[in-house]
Image (cartoon, rainbow, N blue to C red):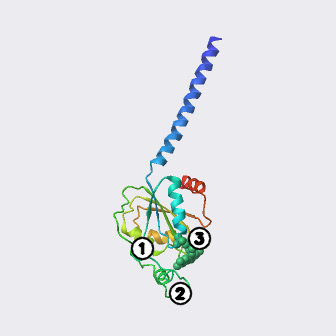
Amino acid sequence: MKKIFLIALGLIIISAGVVFNLNNKSQAKENEKMDKRVLVAYFSATGTTKKVAEDLASAINADIYEIKPKIPYTKADLDWTDKNSRSTIEMKDHNSRPEITKDDFSTDKYDTIFLGFPIWWYIAPTIVNTFLESHDFSNKKIILFATSGGSGFGRTAENLKKSVSNSTEIKEGKLFNNHPRKEELKKWTEEVL
Ligand SMILES: Cc1cc2nc3c(=O)[nH]c(=O)nc-3n(C[C@H](O)[C@H](O)[C@H](O)COP(=O)(O)O)c2cc1C
């Protein structure tokens, strides 16, 4: 009887140990995710991507940074039906690099950057290349998100990779065309982080 009792006690102690260890491991994994220093950076000409970026940053408690053009885009600049508009001219030349406003922004504090923008002519506006070429993204992970009138990412990632070093990982993320709820944004970040 005493022997059975001791065996049962032993089994209980072993199972408790396994459960404790598993809990600890999943907690450690969670902490590792939270420890990642995350930034949400975005460019938005008419406010759609800005709203998604703000909700994303707030959902995951991340810093946020706006890529601002040195010369803001006017409504006429954004007229994609006009072949002489600023945006059409810039997007026809993939090497165009519209200037951004300079400030003391640095990537040092971050490991992972969610980078958002509108799709222009099936890719990211070239001002996003300016941003990537203006800072050091070596060894960082960049996850793209975008808004559009319906187009997908196309060759967006490929075009942006030209503006970073080989040590930078650029991952095609998600298009958020129907303004997502914060819970949806948070769930998505948990999948990709
Ligand atoms: C110059 C220009 C080009 C665009 N090109 C596309 C395109 O190729 N495909 C698409 O689905 N939407 C296109 N759009 C629509 C934008 O991607 C869409 O309205 C986006 O949500 C705007 O985001 P924002 O308000 O953050 O600037 C274009 C808009 C502009 C101004």
Q: Quadrant of residue 10?
A: top right
At mark 1, the secondary structure is loop
Count how many numbered circles sit on residues in the image.
3
Q: Nearer the viewer, residue 133 or 109?
A: 109
Q: Amino acid at mark 1?
A: Pro
The residue at which mark 1 appears reads as 69
**For residue 154, side relative to residue 127 (left or right):** right
Question: Mark 1 CB in 8 Å range of ligand 1?
Answer: no
Q: Earlier in the sequence, mark 3 or mark 2?
A: 2
Q: Where in the image, quadrant-wise, is ligand 1 located?
A: bottom right
Q: Residue 91's x, y, as percent?
A: 48, 80
Q: Nearer the viewer, residue 86 or 37?
A: 86
Q: Amino acid at mark 2?
A: Asp
Q: Quadrant of residue 168?
A: bottom left
| Quadrant into which the N terminus falls | top right
Q: Nearer the viewer, residue 119 or 48?
A: 48
Residue drawn at 33 percent across, 63 percent down: 104
At mark 2, the secondary structure is loop
Q: Earlier in the sequence, mark 2 or mark 1?
A: 1
At mark 3, the secondary structure is loop
Q: Could you tell me how far apart the alpha carbons at marks 3 and 1 are, in whole angstroms? A: 24 Å
The answer to whether 26 is drawn above or below residue 13 in the figure is below
Q: Residue at the top extreme?
A: 1
The answer to whether 79 is drawn above or below residue 12 in the figure is below
Mark 3 or 2, closer to the camera: 2
Residue drawn at 51 percent across, 53 percent down: 60
Q: Residue at the left extreme?
A: 104
Category of crowding for the residue at label 1, using alpha-carbon neighbours closer than 10 angstroms: few (below 14), some (14–19), many (at least 20): some
The residue at which mark 2 appears reads as 82
Q: Residue 29's x, y, as percent?
A: 50, 44
**For residue 143, side relative to residue 149 (left or right):** left
